[in-house]
Image (spheres, helix red, strand yellow):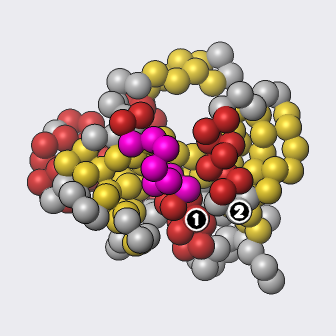
Amino acid sequence: MVVETERLLLIPLTSEQLRLWICDLAALERTLSCTYRGMPLDTAFTEDGFSFTLGDLVQAQAERCVNAYPFGTYWWLVRKIDLTAVGTIDFKTAPNEAGQVEIGYGLSPAFEHRGYMTEAVRVLTEWTLKQPGAATVVSLVETDNRPSRSVMSRAGFRETCTEDGFCRYEFTRNL
């Protein structure tokens, strides 16, 4: 399965592909016929006092992916023009009882300010809201992360509140 935008292919990785990403990136690039130039797996994050890497997150997704695909995985954002993976987008969970699903994303700094993430968020949000049980897509963005806040606004999300240094953005399906 692939979701397309004007300039991107959004490719949800299977649990095996997630494992390849961790253990053998070159093999995954051959499998997907593209080159990965997104964030390195050793990119560090801190949340709620815990430090972890993108590789840690990918490993956790690989374990969840089997039962929650395509919600429990990372999606590579691959430019059509040169088949370069420039970033990722993922779901934190499958839709909950209220129909909410949370997304997160990351883009290699070399590809920022070109509209790729806004394009990906818009199209994946449209795709998500067509899935059974999904009614609202949310994203929590650090208050001081102006670029991500701009992505959410340009993608049509509305800011609903600010809590603990984060802004909550929502896009709800019209019923």
List the residue tagged with mark 1: 122
From this view, report whether residue 107 is shown above or below residue 32.
above
Specify which label sits upstream in the sequence, 2 or 1: 1
| Left or right: 62, with 168 as reference point | left
- Residue 155 located within the stretch drawn in magenta: no
Residue in the foreground of this view, choosing between 108 and 92:
108
Q: Quadrant of the N terminus?
A: bottom left
Discs 2, 1 touching: Cβ within 8 Å? yes
Which residue shows up at 71% across the image and 28% down it? 144
The location of residue 97, given as percent across then percent down, is 76, 64
Q: Which mark is residue 156?
A: 2
Local crowd at mark 1 within 10 Å, few (<14), some, or many (≥20)? some
Q: Nearer the viewer, residue 13 or 111?
A: 111
Mark 2: which amino acid?
Answer: Gly
Mark 1 is on which residue type?
Arg
Q: Is residue 27 left or right of residue 111?
A: left
At x 57%, y 46%, the residue is 104
Residue 109: % across, % down: 41, 34
Q: Position of residue 12 (x, y in %)?
A: 38, 61
Q: Which residues are magenta?
A: 111-118
Q: Secondary structure at mark 2?
A: loop
Q: Residue at x 55, y 73 (%)?
A: 127
> Looking at the image, can residue 59 be seen?
no
Number of marks drawn: 2
Q: Residue furthest bottom?
A: 175
Q: In terms of depth relative to the viewer, which is nearer, 73 or 79?
A: 79
Kindly identify the residue that appears in the image at 15 percent across and 59 percent down.
Answer: 33
Indicate which disc residue 79 carries.
none
Residue 141 lies, in percent from the top left, at 69, 39
Instruction: Identify the element where label 1 is drawn.
Output: helix
**Side of 103 where 3 appears, left or right:** left
